[in-house]
Image: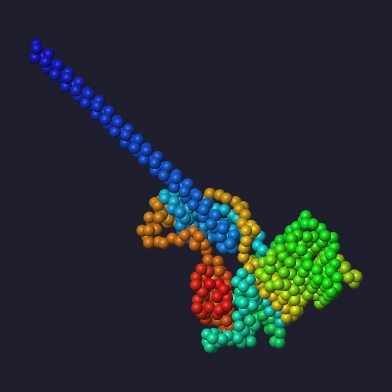
Amino acid sequence: MHSTLRFSSESARRSSSGTVMFAALAVVVTVTMLVAGLMQLSTSMTRQQIVSVDNKRAFYIAEAGLSEAIYGLHLNKTGAVGTSALPARFGDGYFWVEAEDQGNGRVKLDSTGMAGAGRFALAVTVERSAAKVGSLGIFAMSGLSIDRGTYIDGYNSILGTYAQQEAPAKPSGLFGGMGNLGKLQGAPPATSVLAKVGANGEVSITGTQLEPTIIEGDVTPGPTSSVLASGSVTIQGATTPRDQPIELPAIEVPVGFPSQGSLAVAANTTQALPQGQGSYGSIFVSSGARLELLGPLELTAGELRVEAGGELHLNASSGPIDLFVTQRLWIAEGATISSVETPSTETSLLVSASEWSDRNGDLLPDPPADLRATGQFFGTIYAPHSPLTIVSGFEVFGGVIAEQLTIENTAKLHFDFALTTDIGEDVDAPTMLSWKIVELPDNQFVKHKHDPKGLFESLGILTPKAALAHDVVLFHIAYLDFNDKVYVWHGLESSFDRSKIKLEIASYTDGEPIPFLWPIGALAAKVK
């Protein structure tokens, strides 16, 4: 009896102990699973947080890429920064920006940012700030006619005066003893900067054996037009028609200036206008009189007339001069325009007048602007609603833009490259037209979801800093063409036609040292 009870008690204890152990094991397993799940959840959340943070970093780096690209556009660069094969380094991340020119001054920028495991792509479309109208160079809204003996070239007033940038007409030293490279004898002096000549219509150029016409630069006719050259004409650059016509911007005439009524400068007198701002209904300069304009000066005039023998003198050495003419510009044949030599970016003659009317009693309508002065002008002449004639004996350093343009025989024009360069704090930045998130590009670095820094280091890739990764702006090359003439060309390397080269003398891109063999020694010394 006692044995049976003892056995039963022991069995009960064993059963109870097994149940407790099973329950404890179940609790342990359950807790372990919960802990593993929590750890997995925590790891997943941490990973998600890291990816989220990296994506945000990549987003901000892509934004930084767009900012860098827009800044590049502001400086007349292409907008491209870095490449998909060699991104730009920014902080602890990387980006590259691709730029697509969409015409009409609009550029689409695609920026891809990478940081850690984060990847982000953004796109914007921006519109470049309105180009300085002087950057068109010698330009006609309709047709451009260039008579015999005209000489047109370029220079860059940022680098110094025109005379400092002229190459000697007859080479000496190194190039004087290099056979074909010495065949500059008889050619006019030239700088290393190409001129810009063009129109929305036909460009007609004539020259003779005794009075050849030479254009050291590109001549660009309208989209459906051509360059019609007859006689002895030399064009150093391209003559390819433009893709689309140029739209000339309207002149914004300032208002609110104090009015001084009318001004008449009597014969044999000199009158200087004060610096600052002013407005006149009419300004009349008699024969033998001299009117001096000293910058800084913003001046508006309904009518500006200078008689034969009168002189208009411009001095922008102390500040810019902007002269606006709203009703009529008449500078008679035999009048003089004289200037103190300053960068052409400092002076503008802006004629907004557009009305044709009979002003001399011959029953024929006269144009809004008639400019027949001789002398020298440093700056931009802009008359978008009137034809202009540049007469023999008038020399322009800068740009001339008109509705129709005629350049008479033996005139000289020197396009200033500085007119294409945005300088100063008052230049508008490109305007953003659209912004959006776009799909990531199909790229090996984008697909590789690890930190790109380690990947680049393992591959031995040295990435450039963002500020140094902009697309190259200017390429410079000196070469001998198949007519055995030496030329110097500046511009985008992709735009240069290498088929014209018989012998390359030297070349370099911005940021590289200027080669020892660079032929324009005076300019090279300026650029160092």
Q: Tell me residue 108's x, y (percent).
A: 57, 57
* Residue drawn where x is 35% and y is 35% of the image: 38
Q: Tell me residue 214's x, y (percent).
A: 67, 80
Quadrant of the image occupied by residue 418: bottom right
Q: From what the image shows, is residue 306 above or below residue 21? A: below
* Residue drawn where x is 69% and y is 64% of the image: 319
* Residue drawn where x is 55% and y is 53% of the image: 123
Residue 384 visible somewhere in the drawing = no
Q: Tell me residue 332's x, y (percent).
A: 82, 73
Q: Nearer the viewer, residue 487 or 208?
A: 487
**The N terminus lies in which quarter of the figure?**
top left
Taking 455 as reference, is 189 left or right?
right
Taking 266 as reference, is 516 left or right?
left
Q: Nearer the viewer, residue 367 or 392?
A: 392
Q: From what the image shows, is residue 66 above or below residue 482? A: above
Residue 273 visible somewhere in the drawing = yes
Quadrant of the image occupied by residue 18: top left
Q: Nearer the viewer, residue 238 or 372?
A: 372
* Residue drawn where x is 22% and y is 23% of the image: 19
Extreme top residue here?
A: 1
